[in-house]
Amino acid sequence: MKQNICGIDRILRIVLGAVLIALAAFGVIGWWGFIGAVPLVTGLIRFCPLYPLIGFSSCKK
């Protein structure tokens, strides 16, 4: 897997994912908040499977 998530995109994914999971864990929002695992994991591994399909990368060439 070639990295396609860098910079602010990566930071926003990790923060958003962590916040959604925390809110769901504390019961502030419903169980759907655990969907935050998707942006969290993609931010941590620096790869989004959707990006190659649309021909996008947030990493500098």
Image: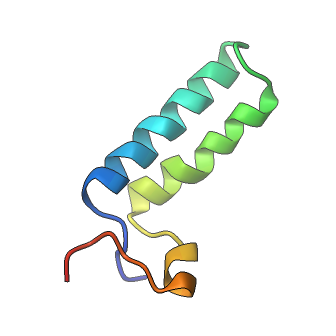
Task: State the image coordinates of residue 60 (x, y, percent, origin top left).
Answer: 20, 75
In the image, 2 versus 8, the foreground residue is 8
Task: State the image coordinates of residue 49 (x, y, percent, origin top left).
Answer: 56, 75
> Is residue 49 visible to the viewer in this orientation of the structure?
no
Task: State the image coordinates of residue 18 (x, y, percent, origin top left).
Answer: 50, 33
Residue 47 relative to residue 28: left or right: left
> Is residue 4 visible to the viewer in this orientation of the structure?
yes
Task: Determine whether 34 is above or below 27 in the image.
Answer: below
Q: Quadrant of residue 25?
A: top right
Residue drawn at x 57%, y 23% as measured from the top left: 22
In the image, 28 versus 2, the foreground residue is 28
Residue drawn at x 66%, y 13% as measured from the top left: 26
Q: What colour scheme governs how the chains and residues are painted in the rendered image of this protein?
A: rainbow
Residue 32 relative to residue 61: left or right: right
In the image, 61 versus 49, the foreground residue is 61
Task: Determine whether 42 is above or below 15 in the image.
Answer: below
